[in-house]
Amino acid sequence: MTDDLLTEHLMLHAVDVDEARRIRGRTPRADDSWAHDYPFEGDVAGLGAFLHASERFGEQRPFGYYRISRRADGLAIGGIGFKGAPVDGIVEIGYGLAPSGRGHGYAAEALRAVCSLAAGLGVRLVRADTELDNLASQRTLGHAGFRVVSEDETLRYCELPLPEA
């Protein structure tokens, strides 16, 4: 349904419900290629939200969940996804990488790819949030062009305005 997104270092694969269940259940098929620490708890939680939305609203792609794999070795190292379809041109995203995928700029690269996809689909604003003490995620959002717009006692909220397609 949705083509994979290719970046310099990554392949972002739009998962379907069956694949999401397999990843969430940590039950790889013989042809799956996963890093030793994938999926991690963030993937399991993100896929749970994706599956719930799929059951409630039907097909989520292209505003669904994408498995992040390194192009160099093909190993799955994390995920990134939309938290639902756009509302009034605004969409929210979440992302995470297994520990073995962190520290290489992959999360920012994946963020830029899904934001580019969203811009091409008419989205005008992307939102994300991060816990106040998650400095790595805040740096990642900054590297992808997001700006802090507010915070509360637990979360920092960021936005990225998108150019019109």
Image (cartoon, rainbow, N blue to C red):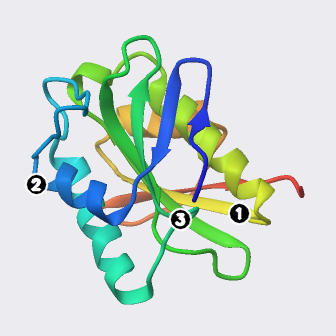
Residue contact between numbered discs 1 and 2, judged by CB atoms under 8 Å: no
Q: CA distance from mark 3 to mark 1?
A: 18 Å
93 left or right, relative to 144: left
First in residue order: circle 1 vs circle 2: 2
42 left or right, relative to 69: left
Task: Give the percent coordinates (x, y) of residue 38.
Answer: 19, 34
The residue at the point 32 percent across, 37 percent down is 78
Reading the image, the residue beneath label 3 is 61
Q: Callout 2, which amino acid?
A: Gly
Q: Quadrant of the C terminus?
A: bottom right
First in residue order: circle 3 vs circle 1: 3
Task: Give the percent coordinates (x, y) of residue 93.
Answer: 49, 58
Task: Give the percent coordinates (x, y) of residue 51.
Answer: 29, 71
Relative to the observer, which residue lies in front, 47 or 112? 47
Reading the image, the residue beneath label 2 is 25
Q: Callout 3, which amino acid?
A: Arg
Task: Give the percent coordinates (x, y) of residue 148.
Answer: 57, 51
Q: Callout 1, which amino acid?
A: Leu
List the single residue furthest toward the top: 72
Secondary element at tag 2 = loop
First in residue order: circle 2 vs circle 3: 2
Quick one: label 2, few (<14), some, or many (20+) residues within 10 Å? Answer: few
**Mark in the foreground, 1 or 2:** 2
Residue 125, which numbered label? 1
Q: CA distance from mark 1 to mark 2?
A: 33 Å
